[in-house]
Amino acid sequence: MGFSEEVRGAAQTIRRAEAVSVISHIDADGISSEAIVRTAVARAGVPVSSHFVRQLEPLTMKAVPEDDSLKVFVDLGAGQQNLLEERGLSPDEVLILDHHVAQPCGIEYQQVNGVPHGHTRLSAAGVAYFVAKALDEENVDLAKIAIVGNVGDMMARETLGLVGPAAEIVADGVEHGSVRVVRRDLNCYGTSTRPVHVCLSYNDDPRIPGITNDTPGALRFLKKLLGYELKGPGGRWLVWEELDLPVRTKITSALVQQLLANGEGVERVFADSYLFPDEPARSPLRNASEYATLLNACGRWAKPGIGSKICCGDRGDAYREAEYMLNNHRSIIRELLQYILDTGVTELSHLQYLHIGDRYPDTIVGIGAGMALGKLNWRKPILIMCTLPEDHTLTKVSMRTNEWSVRRGVDLQAALNAASAEFGGGGGGHPIAAGAFIPHEAEGVFVSRVNDLLRDQLA
Ligand SMILES: [Mn+2]
């Protein structure tokens, strides 16, 4: 069966259902997938309720309601079909919309997944969007949310823009008028909300000496280049999106010159960006990557439902609460970053590591690690361990590196997967960012094992 047949089959199953329960994941892709499915199902006139889980495992299976509804698992489920079977779910009460590699089990559950069809850069929100569109062509207004999920799940990162079926979603959004694409825009996070010099200095892909991790340096660079400061009316700093095209071109050309002078590649200076003209200027909802961060902040602080409401258009109470969470999220991450820098890391030959105990929630440790990397020895991947407050026998491991290392062969997901499997744990993620759970007592041996694996990757 082809991908579009799977999509049509899923739409039929939903149409026939008397009620739908959506079970989804708490990250940006999971939240946007849930919002897409919930909206499309409700529009089809089928009663729908939603349930979010941190991950689908035996303990969280209780979030799956015991009733006659159709259970639609989104952004999870493909790899946990054995759990669905153990729970006694029959094939006619399950639909899986996912983009993770499927683990077959005794029962063959209905599933829509791009991966077996070679669509490896289509996240769950993308899959959900195609099902929504098959339910009703009018659902093209959900393309915007699907783009947020895809970008949030790093589907555009390596390719510097969305490709394949995800690019079709972009085309739908553009045609609908709720999405604007800027081709070969500045490949930088924060182009809608951060002062330009801050935006440039926070970016380490590509790394530019004198600008990356050097906000005053970035400011000097811009002032020297332009002869003036990028300030608007009332003296407030302008954001990238507000600059005229000639100014933007002047800046990117200068960045390209700097990289060439250092013998570095220049292709990662540019990437397609996805803007939402119907959202207020200078708000984090204005572009896909900042929107995704807002959703992630909601999920990481255990309020995925707030993120979902925002996806469905709430710009009142839910939006205010999300903005508060985003600010709180950032201030705690800054605190964590300072803690990592103050405490210091231990360097091995191929990584640097630190154990932070249970001082910070495990959901933000990876982000803190990523930020600390830029201020430490950025050539060595960073590994941070933390204790889970709910289970002290388990240690969560988060690793981060940068494009520079990935280009040289580093694959954190492969290393963490292999090493954690040796200790009966499990891992997942991407070459640039990955995580794993391991038994507490294995910590010391585990770290040196990961170090060995990274050495082998670079050999
Ligand atoms: Mn996902």
Image (spheres, rainbow, N blue to C red):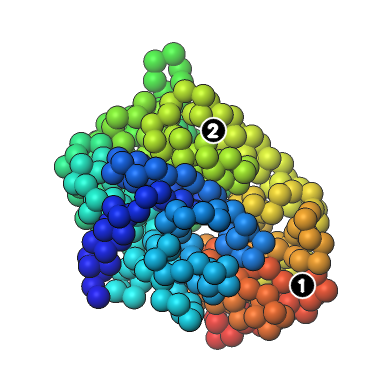
Please give the name of the residue rendered at 55% of the width and 86% of the height, measured from the top-left corner.
Answer: 459
Query: Measuring 34% from the left and 65% from the top, which residue is drawn there?
Result: 112
Q: Which mark is residue 439?
A: 1
* Mark 2 burial class by Cα count in 10 Å: few <14, some 14-19, many 20+: many
Whether residue 166 is visible to the viewer of this picture, yes or no, is no
Q: Nearer the viewer, residue 356 or 348?
A: 356
Q: Name the foreground residue: 308 vs 361.
A: 308
Calculate the distance from the C-alpha at mark 1 to the C-alpha at mark 2.
Answer: 34 Å
Horizontal relation, residue 198 to residue 375: left or right: left
Residue 420, position in %: x, y? Answer: 66, 77
| Amino acid type, callout 1 | Pro
The x and y percentages for residue 362 are 69, 54
Q: Is residue 277 above or below residue 338?
A: above
In the rendered structure, are the residues bearing label 1 and label 2 in contact, judged by CB atoms less than 8 Å apart? Answer: no
In the picture provided, is 361 more to the left or to the right than 209?
A: right
Q: Which mark is residue 322?
A: 2
Q: Position of residue 258 (x, y in %)?
A: 40, 53
Residue at the left extreme, as displayed: 175
Count of residue discs: 2
